[in-house]
Image (cartoon, helix red, strand yellow):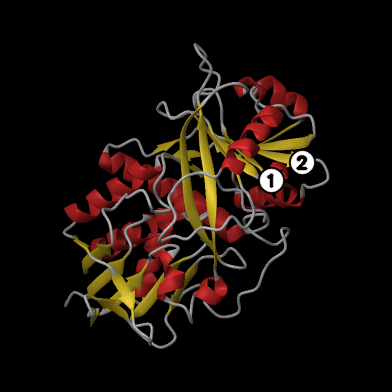
C-alpha cells in the first residue's frame, strides 16, 4: 500500500503529536518549524502545565482529558522520561461564582472521574498552603497533576524521529490565496497539517484571524521557603482559582511555585515583543499570593515566562479543512487548554488528516460564537 506524503507545520505539542501519530500510521511525515523544536517563543514551552479533567458541563473534553492522561502515561513508560506527575488538582469554588464547578461535579459523576468534594475546613486541614476564607467548597481530582511541558515536546519529537519522521527547519508562509509556501514555492504533499499555534492567525488572515484572539500570559515562579517542602508537588496539588482569575502548580523538580494571574486582553506582538513579563503582572501576582498563599509572602521570584495563547470565541479547538485547499488541514486553537490534550488531539487530527473519519462539529471553522462561562469548557 502506497504511503501518503504528509507535512506538519509547527513543532509545538499539537504538531509533534500529530506528526508522531501520522508516522505511526505508516505515513512518511516531515515536520517543519521556524526554530528549534522546544524553542522559547512556543506556547508549548515552559517548565510545566496542568493536566486535569475538569471542563464544566462538557463531557467531550472531560473524556478526552482522561484518555489523554492514559496516553501520557503510556508515552512516559515507552520513553523512560518523567513526563507526568499525579500530584492532584484542587479546584476552588468561590462563593457566588460556582456554576462551572457545580457543573463539573455532575459531569465527573456521569463520566466516572474520581474526585472529592472538600469543605473549606477540609481544605485547610489537608492543604494548609491555601487560605480559603471566601471559598464555598473545593473539588479535588487526585489523578490530575502536571506535565513537564518542554520535556513532553522534546520526548515526542524524539519518538517521532525514531519512527522514521523527518524534522526540517524553515519558515512556512502563505500567499494571497492562503496556500502554504516554503522558500517561495507551494508546499507539495498529499496532506499538509498546519499547527503553528498563535501564528495560524497571521498565516490565514481570512480563514482563522476572524475567529481568533491572541493574548499574552504572564507566569511567575516563586521560591519555596528555606528548609520547607510544604510547597513541593509531593505535598501540594496544582490548583485552579477562577474567582481570582488564577491557576498554579507546586514546585516541581526545583522549579519554584508557578502562579499565573490572567490579566484579560494582555496584548502581545508575537513576532516582535520581547518575552519579558509586565510589571503589572508582578504586582498582581504578589497580591494574589498574599491573598491565597500567605506562606509564600516575602519569597522571591526565581523565574518567569511571558508567552501567548490563541483563543477561539467558544474556546474549542480547530481541526478543519481549509475551505479552498482540500489537502490543507488547520489544527490548533485555544492553546490555553490544548497542551494537556496533546496525545489524543494528535491522534484525532491524524485520523482526520487521513480521512479515517470527519472532524467534530465543535472543531469546524464555521459557526463560531462566544459561549457564556456556564457553557464554556474552560469556564471563561
Q: Answer whether labels 2 and 1 touch (C-beta < 8 Å).
A: yes
Residue toward you, 348 or 304: 304
The crowd level at tag 1 (other Cα within 10 Å; few <14, some 14-19, many 20+) is many
Q: Position of residue 4 (x, y in %)?
A: 22, 76
Residue 242 figure quarter: top right
Residue toward you, 347 or 97: 97
Residue toward you, 16 or 274: 274
Q: Position of residue 291 (x, y in %)?
A: 71, 30
Q: Mark number for residue 331?
A: none
Helix, strand or loop for disc 1: helix
- In this rendering, position of residue 47 left or right of residue 128: left
- In this rendering, position of residue 85 left or right of residue 327: right
Q: Position of residue 143 (x, y in %)?
A: 52, 38
Q: CA distance from mark 2 to mark 1?
A: 8 Å
**Above or below, comparing residue 183 to residue 199 in the picture:** below
Location of the N terminus by quadrant is bottom left
Location of the C terminus by quadrant is bottom right
Does residue 191 appear anywhere in the picture?
Answer: yes
Does residue 115 appear anywhere in the picture?
Answer: no
**Disc 2 or 1, which lies upstream in sequence?**
2
**Above or below, comparing residue 96 to residue 125 in the picture:** below
Q: Mark number for residue 242?
A: 1
Q: Mark number for residue 94?
A: 2
**Residue in the image at 63% along x and 42% along y:** 246
- Hey, which residue is sitting farthest right in the picture? 96
**Residue in the image at 60% along x and 21% along y:** 298
Helix, strand or loop for disc 2: strand
Q: Position of residue 169 (x, y in %)?
A: 21, 62
- Hey, which residue is sitting farthest top in the picture? 227
- In this rendering, position of residue 376 left or right of residue 24: right
**Above or below, comparing residue 14 to residue 329 in the picture:** above
Amino acid at each position: 500500500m502506497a504511503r501518503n506524503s504528509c507535512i506538519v507545520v509547527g513543532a509545538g505539542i499539537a504538531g509533534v503529536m500529530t506528526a508522531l501519530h501520522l508516522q505511526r500510521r505508516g505515513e512518511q511525515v516531515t515536520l517543519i518549524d521556524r526554530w528549534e523544536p522546544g524553542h522559547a517563543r512556543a506556547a508549548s514551552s515552559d517548565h510545566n502545565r496542568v493536566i486535569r479533567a475538569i471542563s464544566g458541563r462538557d463531557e467531550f473534553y472531560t473524556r478526552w482529558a482522561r484518555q489523554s492522561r492514559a496516553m501520557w502515561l503510556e508515552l512516559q513508560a515507552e520513553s523512560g522520561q518523567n513526563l507526568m506527575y499525579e500530584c492532584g488538582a484542587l479546584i476552588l469554588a468561590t462563593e457566588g461564582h460556582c456554576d462551572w464547578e457545580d457543573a463539573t461535579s455532575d459531569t465527573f459523576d456521569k463520566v466516572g472521574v474520581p474526585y472529592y468534594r472538600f469543605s473549606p475546613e477540609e481544605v485547610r486541614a489537608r492543604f494548609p498552603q491555601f487560605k480559603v476564607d471566601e471559598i464555598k467548597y473545593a473539588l479535588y481530582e487526585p489523578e490530575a497533576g502536571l506535565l513537564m511541558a518542554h520535556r513532553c515536546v522534546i520526548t515526542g519529537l524524539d519518538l517521532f524521529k525514531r519512527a522514521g519522521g523527518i524534522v526540517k527547519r524553515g519558515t512556512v508562509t502563505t500567499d494571497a490565496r492562503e496556500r502554504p509556501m516554503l522558500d517561495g514555492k507551494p508546499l507539495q504533499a498529499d496532506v499538509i497539517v498546519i499547527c503553528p499555534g498563535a501564528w495560524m492567525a497571521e498565516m490565514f488572515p481570512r480563514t482563522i484571524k476572524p475567529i481568533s484572539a491572541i493574548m499574552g500570559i504572564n507566569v511567575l515562579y516563586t521560591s519555596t521557603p528555606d528548609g520547607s517542602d510544604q510547597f513541593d508537588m509531593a505535598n501540594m496539588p496544582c490548583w485552579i482559582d477562577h474567582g481570582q482569575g488564577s491557576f498554579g502548580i507546586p514546585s516541581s523538580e526545583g522549579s519554584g511555585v508557578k502562579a499565573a494571574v490572567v490579566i484579560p486582553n494582555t496584548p502581545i506582538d508575537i513576532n516582535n515583543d520581547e518575552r519579558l513579563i509586565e510589571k503589572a503582572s508582578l504586582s498582581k501576582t504578589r497580591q494574589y499570593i498574599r491573598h491565597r498563599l500567605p506562606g509564600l509572602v516575602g519569597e522571591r521570584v526565581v523565574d518567569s515566562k511571558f508567552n501567548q495563547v490563541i483563543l477561539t470565541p467558544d474556546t474549542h479547538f480547530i481541526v478543519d479543512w481549509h475551505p479552498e485547499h482540500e489537502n490543507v488541514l488547520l489544527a490548533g486553537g485555544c492553546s490555553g487548554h490544548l497542551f494537556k490534550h496533546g496525545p489524543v488531539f494528535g491522534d484525532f487530527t491524524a485520523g482526520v488528516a487521513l480521512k479515517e473519519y470527519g472532524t467534530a462539529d465543535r472543531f469546524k471553522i464555521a459557526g463560531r460564537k462566544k459561549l457564556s462561562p456556564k457553557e464554556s469548557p474552560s469556564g471563561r
